[in-house]
Image (spheres, grey):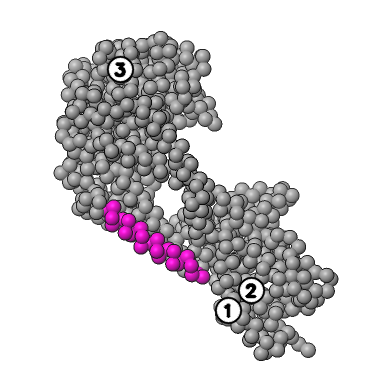
Amino acid sequence: MIKEQLTGKKIAITGSTGFLGTALVEQLLRTIPDVKLVLLVRSSKRTASQRVKREILNNDAFGPLRKELGDEEFDRLTRDQIDAVSADIALDNLGLDEQGKETLKGCDIVIHSAAAVSFDEPLDRAVEVNLMGPVRLVALLKELNINPHLVMVSTCYVAGSRKGDAPEQALTSSPFYVPIDWNDEIHAARRTRSYVEDASRRPNNLESFRNSARAELGAAGTPALAKKTEQLRERWVKDQMVEAGRNRANSIGFPDAYAFTKAMSEQAVEETRSQIPLTIVRPSIIESSWKSPTSGWIRGFRMAEPIILNFGKGTLKEFPGIPEGILDIIPVDLVSSAIIACAAQEPSSDTTIYQVASGSCNPIRTSKLADYVHKFFGENPIYDEKNQPIAPAKWRFPGRGRVESQLRRAQGLLGQAEQTLNKLPIRGRQAMIVADIQNRKDEIDKALEYVTLYGKYVECEALYSVDNLLTLWDSLSEEDKNVFLFDPRSIDWYEYVYNIHLPTVITKGRVKTSPSKSSAKSRSSRLRSQVLDSQRQLAVFDLENTLIASNVVSSWSYLATKRLPKAERVKLVTKTLAQAPSMLALDRKDRSDFLRSFYRRYAEAPVAQIDDDSFEMFSELILTKSFPAAIRRVREHRALGHRTVLITGALDFVVKPLQPLFDDIISATLSSDGNTYTGQMKQVPPIGETRAAVLRRFAEENNFDLSESVAYADSASDLPMLEAVGFPVAVNPEPKLASLANKRGWLIENFEPVAGSPTKLLPIGSRARS
C-alpha cells in the first residue's frame, strides 16, 4: 500500500516551484498522512520559505485542499509538514549550509524534478542544470554518507529521434546509444560560452548591434541606444548558445539540448551513484491534469498551449507533423501519481526505469487531435478586435521545411515593407501601418519559433514502452488505484482534449471568446481614463507634432523671410528646401546636433526684431498649425489639478506666447550680446535624453512622482522622456515610435490640425508693416 509505505517518511524534492513539482507537493500533502516534505528551493529576492508560500502554496492547485481543511487547518498542516530549505542545483553542494545538510541527512527519499525544461535553452545552462544538477545532488548525498531512494525525473525523449519501440531500459543498453563522455560535454559547453561571449564583443558584431539599435529606436539618444545595443548583444549570445545546443544535440540524434542533457544526466548519475538506489521516471509531454487536484489544472503554458491558442487566433494556419503519427502527451496528475508510486517501492540495487507515456497503449493521432481542436474553435471561436469570430483553418500538415520556408519568405517581405515605410516622412494614422506590419512580423516570428522548437516533437515516430509502468499499476490495490491513478489507458482523449484541456487553455490565455458589448470601453478609452485620472501629478508635453503641426525650420523660415524683399524670400525658401534631405538625415541621426547646427542661422539676428515678429508668428503660424484636441488636452490636465509643463527644443521666443497655457515652460535659448543673437546655444537643448534628465530634475525639485505622471511626444527621440513616466502617450507618432508604443501598450493619440490650416512646405512671413 502506497500510503502505508510513505506515511511518516521524510521526502526531499527539488523543482517544487515548477509545474510537476507543485503537483507532487499537493498530492503528497493530500494523500500521505504525516509525510514530511523538505523543499529545496533557490533563494532570490525572497527567501526559500517566502517562495514556497508565494509560488507553491498560494497556487490554485491547493484550492480544493484548502477548502476541505479550512484556512487555519491548512496553514497548520503546511507549517508542520513542510520545511523550506535554501538550495541551488547550479552550485556545488547545492549551496546548502550546515543546517540544510543536516535536514537533508534525515530524508528517506529524494525526488529530483528540477530541470531547465525549455526546448530552446542555451547549451551551457541546459548542461549546468539538467546534467550537472543531478551530478551535484549525487555528490552531496555521497559526501553526507547517506543512501536515500533517489527518484530522478527524466524524459521519454532521451530516446532521441529514433523510430519505433523505445523500451524502458538504460540508454547504454540501446542499439542507438552513441558513446559520449559526459564530462567532455560539460567542459565543451563552458568553452562554447566563453567563445561566444568573446565573439559578441568583436568590433564588427558590436557595430552590427549598434546599427540594429539605431534602426529600431532612431535618434533616441546615447543612453537608450547603448541600453538597446547591450540587449541585442545579450540576445545574440543567447541565440548562439541555443543554436550551439541544438546543433550538438542534432549531431548525435537528439531533437534539442533539453533531451540531450537529460540523456547525459541519466548516464552520469548511473556512473556516479555508487550505493545510492536509483529509480528513473521518464514522462512524455506533460500537460494539464486529467482528474486531480482538479480537472484541467495547469501551471503556466507548456508545449501545446501556445500552438493551440495561435491556431484559434488564426495566426498559425499550417503546422508540420505526420497526420497518422502519434502525439505522446500525458496529464500531469498521472505523472505525479507514478512518481509517488515509484518512490513507495522498495528500491533494488539495479536502476529501475519507468516511462509514463500514452502512445504505445492509448495513442492519440496527430490528425485526431487537430480535428478536436478545429471542432472546438469552430464551435467556440476566438473573436478579433473587430468583434468578428475567427474561423479556424484546416491543417494539411505539410513538411516542416515547407512551413519554415513559407514563414521565412513572409518575414522577408514584411521586413522590406517596414524598412521602406520607416524612411518615409509619415506619422500618425499612416505610421500605424508600420505598427500593424510589426504585429504581423511578431506573429510570424512566433509561428516560426513554434515550428523550430516543436516541429521535431510532432514528427516524432518513437513508441515509448510502458511495460514496467503497467506492471507496477497491476500490482497496486484497488484503494491505491483510486487514489494514485497513473494508467494511461484510462484517458478518454475526446473528453480530455475537448472538455478539459481546451477550455483551460482558453481561460488561461485570456482570449476574447464572445463579442464585446457596445457599452464596453475600448482599450484606448481605458488608457485615456488612466491618463486623465485626478491622481496624476505632472502632464508634460513636447511641442512639434504634439501640439502643433510645425517645426523649428518653419519658425525660422517665417522669421527669416518676414522683412525680406519678395525676390529674396523666394531665393531663401528655395535654398532651404534644397537642404531639406540633409537636414532630415542629421535630425534623424542626432536631434541635438541638428538643432545646434540649424540655430546658427540666427547669428546676428536683432533680438528686439525677433521678439516682435515672434508674437505675430504665433497668431499667423503657430495657432493655425495647432491641434485643437491637443490644446484641449492641456486644459483638461490643468482642470484636474495636474501641473502642466512644456519641454521643447524650440527657442524661448517662439514658445513665449504659449505661457498662459502652461504652468511651466522649459525651452532652448540662444546667447546674445544684448542687441543681436550669436547663433550659439546657452545650454544643451532639452531634447532626447537631456529632456528626460530635465524632467527628472524638475520632478525632484518640485516633489512630483514621475510614476504618477503623463508625458506626450511624437518621436522615437523622445523615448527617454516617455519611459521616465508612468503614463506615456504617443501623439501623431512617427513609424518607429508607433511600433514601440503599440508593442508596449501605450496610449496613441492622433490629433488633427485646424481645418483649412496652411499646407505650404515652408511658411513665408507676412510683410512687416512700415
What residue is shown with label 2? Answer: 553
Secondary structure found at label 1: helix
What residue is shown with label 1? Answer: 578
Q: Earlier in the sequence, mark 2 or mark 1?
A: 2
Left or right of 232 on screen, residue 169: left
Inspect this view and state whether residue 366 appears: yes
Neighbourhood count class around disc 2 (C-alpha, 10 Å): few under 14, some 14–19, many 20 upward: many
Left or right of 66 on screen, residue 409: left
Compared with 765, 16 (above or below) is above
Q: Earlier in the sequence, mark 1 or mark 3?
A: 3
Magenta part of the chain: 403-426
Locate the C terminus by quadrant. bottom right
In reply to whether residue 339 is colored magenta, the answer given is: no
Q: Nearer the viewer, residue 128 or 49?
A: 128
What residue is shown with label 3? Answer: 278
Type of amino acid at the residue the image marks with label 2:
Val
Quadrant in which residue 133 is drawn: top left
Neighbourhood count class around disc 1 (C-alpha, 10 Å): few under 14, some 14–19, many 20 upward: few
Q: Nearer the viewer, residue 225 or 47?
A: 225
Residue 699 screen position, x and y as percent:
69, 51
Q: Residue at x 40, y 20 (%)?
A: 137
Residue 208 screen position, x and y as percent:
48, 54
Compared with 106, 717 (above or below) is below
